[in-house]
Image (tube, helix red, strand yellow):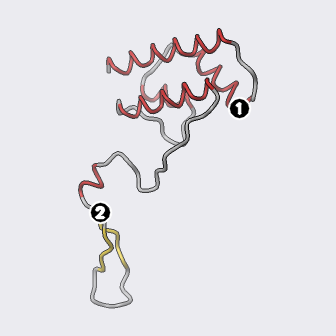
């Protein structure tokens, strides 16, 4: 990337010139590396998001998990959505059964992404 002036006039505006390799990159200019959550439920969803990104089915920053899964055509994980939202927004506890169920549903969703 470089800045380029479109005119010889010193007060002319600068324009950002981006090379083709930067445009083809998956990373945004404003993207920062996110820290992996310590909570196991949130970590599972975080890891699934990273996996989905590699499969070209990533989550947009403005989407809820449910909206994201509907957009990319994933289904059959209502329990996972409920459990994630309970932990993320309700600050509630979860059982080992809920964690195992979430892992199982995320595994199923990964298979759905592979079949796309």
- Could you tell which of marks 2 and 1 lies nearer the N-terminus? 2
54 sits to left or right of 66: left
75 sits to left or right of 42: left
> Label for residue 89?
1
Give how far across and how far down residue 110 sits, in percent. Answer: 41, 19
- Quarter of the rendering containing residue 73: top left
Q: SS at mark 1?
A: helix
> Label for residue 58?
none
Give how far across and how far down residue 65 sits, in percent. Answer: 55, 29
Which residue is depicted at the point 31% across and 70% down? 2
Give how far across and how far down residue 35 sits, in percent. Answer: 55, 41
Which residue is depicted at the point 39% across and 17% down? 112
- Furthest residue to the top? 97
Give the quadrant of the N terminus.
bottom left
The residue closer to the viewer here, 87 or 63, is 87
Which residue is depicted at the point 49% across and 46% down? 33
59 over 107 or under it: above or below: below
Q: SS at mark 2?
A: loop
Residue under pointer 2: 18
């Amino acid at each position: 990337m470089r800045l380029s002036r479109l005119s010889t006039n010193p007060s002319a505006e600068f324009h950002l010139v981006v090379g083709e390799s930067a445009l083809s990159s998956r990373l945004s200019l404003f993207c920062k590396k996110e820290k992996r959550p310590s909570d196991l439920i949130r970590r599972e969803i975080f890891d699934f998001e990273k996996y989905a990104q590699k499969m070209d089915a990533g989550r947009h920053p403005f989407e809820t998990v449910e909206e994201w899964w509907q957009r990319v055509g994933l289904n059959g994980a209502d329990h996972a959505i409920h459990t994630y939202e309970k932990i993320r927004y309700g600050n509630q506890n979860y059982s080992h059964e809920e964690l195992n169920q979430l892992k199982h549903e995320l595994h199923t969703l990964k298979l759905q992404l592979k079949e796309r």
